[in-house]
Amino acid sequence: MNSPLYLLFYAALCLSLASCSLRQPAVVTQDYALKLPAPAAGPAGTRDITVLPLTSAPTASGQMLLYRTSDVRYESDFYNRFLAPPAQVLTSELRQWLTASKAGVVRNPGSPLPSDLTIQPRLTELYADYRDIKNPQAVIGMEIILIGRTDTGNQQLFRRTYRRSVPMKAVSPSAAVEGWGKGAGQIFAEFTADLRRTKP
């Protein structure tokens, strides 16, 4: 094959490959939002409360859904994701929960007025447990530190770990997200009860 014909053949091949690649379907991803149950309103609390932004452990910080398939293996789902980072969403949800349950007067961080209570939450676990595929579980865990303001300064009132493993209706992303929402609501309800019982 002489040089001009070779170049013509090569150009036609490149155009053909480019055309094929352009016709490939785009990657489709699904986005999910966490939805928590509405809290039950209790007696109106009078203490001012500041909820700091949730931090998160490395295995609970991404927007891709996470599945646990063995004791040592976790798999991220590129095609199914949260609309926003879970820690960011749960920070807003916790503030709304405490307000709706009337646990106290919730202030935004950075308020010039000191708060009676400061909440430091951390998301420690957020995955679908598929180790027993016949019994899938939506796992969510948080560590919450409650700090109280006293005459002598701030002091840690408690540091507790809350964890829920919610049975899933099916092995599916939507079932996992539904379970996490239920679990987060259960954790917030338990924490709110603990907060009400705790006095500086």
Image: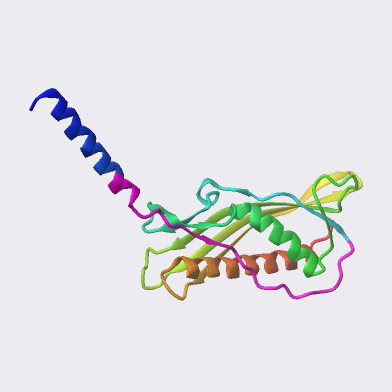
Q: Residue at 53% of width from left, 49% of height from top? A: 62
The quarter of the picture where residue 25 lies is: bottom left
Assign the magenta stretch its main secondary structure: loop
Query: Over which residues does the magenta segment extend?
Result: 19-46
Q: How is the image coloured?
A: rainbow
Q: Residue at 51% of width from left, 63% of height from top? A: 139
Residue nearest the viewer, comparing 48 with 35: 35
Q: Quadrant of the C terminus?
A: bottom right
Q: Residue at 75% of width from left, 63% of height from top? A: 96
Residue 160 in view here: no
Residue nearest the viewer, comparing 159 with 164: 164
Q: Is residue 25 magenta-colored?
A: yes
Residue 171 in view here: yes
Against 186, is 58 above or below? above
Residue nearest the viewer, comparing 198 with 89: 89
Which percent across, then down, holds residue 83?
57, 57
Against 78, is 98 above or below? below
Which percent across, then down, holds residue 131?
37, 63
Which percent across, then down, holds residue 33?
58, 63
Q: Is residue 54 left or right of residue 50?
A: left
Q: Residue furthest top?
A: 3
Which percent across, then down, holds residue 146?
75, 53
Q: Is residue 50 magenta-colored?
A: no
Q: Residue furthest left?
A: 1
